[in-house]
Every structure is written in C-alpha cells, then in structure tokens.
Image (spheres, rainbow, N blue to C red):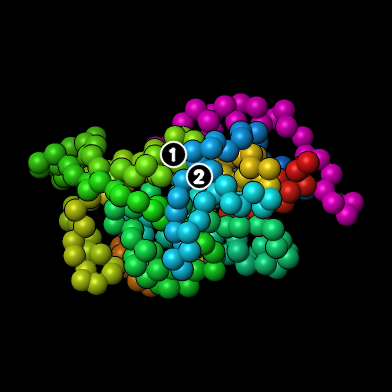
Amino acid sequence: MVRKVLRIQVAAALATAALVAAAPAAFGTSVSQPPASVGAATTTALSAAAANAKFVDQNGTPETLGALKGKTVFVVPYLTLCGDTCPFTTGNLLQLQDLVKKDNLTNVEVIGLDVDPYRDTLTRVKAYAKLIDANFELWTEQGATTKPSLPKGATLSSGMNGTVGKGDLNANLTAIEKFFGWTVQVVPQSSPPPADWMAPYKKLTYDINHSDGFWVIDPSQKVRFVSGTQPAFTGTLSKVLATFMGYKSNIYKTAVYKKGWTPAEALQAIQWVDSTDK
C-alpha cells in the first residue's frame, strides 16, 4: 500500500516548528518539544464538525472528540485490515499506553480513529481489540457508510497502481478527514490478495490508502502537535497480524520504519503539550 505525505496542515506546522519554544512544566520540571524529525507544533482549534463526529468504541460506548474537552488526546488513524503499517501503529499504542500509565498521566486518552468504517463494524473492532489485547480506545464511525468499489479490472497486478475507487464514505469520517487533512482512499488490493485474519477468512477485495502519524489535542481542544511519520515499532506483535502482513516472525528487533515515531517520542509530545497548556 502506498502511503501519501500528509497535506498542507503538516507542512505548515513543520515550517514553523522552530519558532515554538517549550514552556516550563508543572512541579518545576520542563519537557522539551520533540525534534522536527518526529513532527511539529501547531495551534489549530478543533472544528465543530470534527468535535461532534460520532463514533463508538470497542465496548459499544458512543464517543466524540468534543466530549473529551479537558483531557489531552492522542489520536492516530487505523483500520483493522491494514496489511503494512497499522499493526505497527497499534503496537506502538500498546507501549505508549503503558508509558502513560507508568507516568500516572490520568488525564490522557490514547485513541485510534478508524478509516475503513464499511468493514470495521463494532463486531470487527471488538475482535481486533481482543486480538491485540488493546489497552487503549479503538473508535469506529457511527452512521451509514457507502459500499467501496473499484473500476472493473483494477488490480495492482494489472498495472493500475494509480487507480482510486469510490465509497467507504461516512459523514463522520469525512468531518475528521477534512479537519486533520487525512488522505483516505479506496485502492486496489495487492496481488495475490491476502485473506482476512477474521473468520470466514475471505480474500480481501480492496485496500485503504491513508495518512499516517499522530496528532495531540490539548485540554482546550487545540491540536498542539502533529507527526507525519510512520511508526518505528520494536517488540512483539500478535502472531495473527504478523502472518496477515506476510512476516515469518512476530518479533521485531529492529523497526520496519526506522525513521518513524517511537512510543517514547509520542510520550514526549504528550508531556510537552501538557507542559505548555495554559
């Protein structure tokens, strides 16, 4: 799956990153801003549409970003049938949530926001959460989602790599895409197509090309830090997901995306946002 560079929001933030200085944190300590290689500072207020977009978490609880005002929120895009990046993203989130708990950051929410709501029903998201033993929240959009489709014969093996399909449109996802500047596209599946990791294990018929990275929203509901990099995961993943991605081992001693973001850098971004929140 080809991953596209994030849009203007990230580029603008990176251009101004050097102008943003870290402020003293509570209790006389200070936290430095993560380096530009990780991401950049910004001060973009959460739009009403994004704040009110309706989701449901893996437990079936209705959720909105707006309802989390007063908390620091760490957000990433994901889908349960991503075959190359999302499993590493969720692996990083598992480690990040452990770091958040270890540091007793009780006012922090770590959340995955779904970008394939047509397939990622509550039943599937609940199964994915169980598969990875999720200690963070996985949200999928509420409401109607249009069925994805591709032009006839659109496969990677046919040379139609640039083909973009239609569907997987959901008003709540659209609001999130527009605000965060996410790329979310229905694209041809790899050839031969992998089988679903979930019963009845059918062959996949399309893939989702989407933006990667993370976003940190402060308690006043302003996006304060944006990362456009892929996850630099090291550690152990679910064997099922490792096999689904085509790896022989589920233990990653070195990161697949070596220049991506680490759980420690994500924690630093959260702490920096907390330390500069006014």
Residue 10 percent across, percent down from the top left:
54, 33
- Residue named by callout 1: 175
Earlier-in-chain disc, 2 versus 1: 2
Residue 103 percent across, percent down from the top left:
73, 64
Q: Farthest residue in the right direction?
A: 28
Residue 121 seen from this side: yes
Say which residue appears at 60% left-offset and 64% top-offset. 97
Taking the magenta stretch, the answer to whether it contains residue 67 is no
Q: Is residue 224 left or right of residue 200?
A: right
Choose between 217 and 146: the one closer to the eye: 146
Residue 244's disc is none
Q: Which residues are magenta?
A: 1-29
Residue 36 seen from this side: no
Say which residue appears at 88% left-offset and 54% top-offset. 27
Residue 52's disc is 2
Q: Is residue 153 left or right of residue 206?
A: left
Residue 126 percent across, percent down from the top left:
40, 68
For the residue carrying disc 1, how many other residues have a C-alpha within 10 Å: few (<14), some (14-19), or many (20+)?
some
Say which residue appears at 44% left-offset and 66% top-offset. 60
Q: Is residue 232 left or right of residue 164?
A: right
Q: Does dot 1 land on a helix, a strand or a loop?
A: helix
Q: Does dot 2 land on a helix, a strand or a loop?
A: helix
User: What's the distance in space between the residues labelled 2 and 1, CA to CA?
Assistant: 9 Å
CB within 8 Å, label 2 to label 1: yes
Q: Tell which tag, 2 or 1, sits nearer the viewer.
A: 2
Under mark 1, the amino acid is Ala
Q: Quadrant of residue 226?
A: top right
